[in-house]
Amino acid sequence: MLDDNDKTWIHEQLREQLDGVLKHLLAEIGRRQEENNARFDSIDARLKLQAGLLQSGSRAMARFTEFAETSESRWVDLDRRVRAIEQRISPPQQPTL
């Protein structure tokens, strides 16, 4: 049977071993957390870049849509102005016999 000294020694040895294991686990958890934080920072930077690209593309599409919606009226206006200029600079047509 074990006497009190043996029980105390076993108890201290178990406590030391458990303390060592707990310290190792806490250190490992801390390293994993740092790795995850670095990954999250990298992901965050990429997402911000992609969001900026999407936003600028969206703005460009809005400008293009506005341009396309008003281009027909600009073409009609330009055609009218060109015809007016052509009529002013063209010599009068003489009837052919």
Image: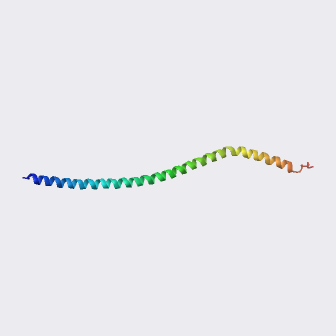
Q: Whole-percent x and y of residue 39?
A: 41, 54
Please tell me which residue lies in front, 33 or 51: 33
Q: Whole-percent x and y of residue 93?
A: 89, 49
Residue furthest left as drawn: 1
Q: Whole-percent x and y of residue 8?
A: 13, 52
Q: Whole-percent x and y of residue 30?
A: 34, 54
Q: Left of 92 or right of it: where is 60?
A: left
Q: Left of 2 or right of it: where is 40?
A: right
Please tell me which residue lies in front, 31 or 54: 31
Please tell me which residue lies in front, 20 or 53: 20
Q: Left of 11 or right of it: where is 70?
A: right
* Number of numbered discs on residues: 0
Which residue sits at x=11%, y=54%? 6
Which residue sits at x=59%, y=47%? 59
Which residue sits at x=75%, y=45%? 77
The colour scheme applied to this rendered structure is: rainbow
Which residue sits at x=48%, y=53%? 46
Q: Left of 83 or right of it: where is 60?
A: left
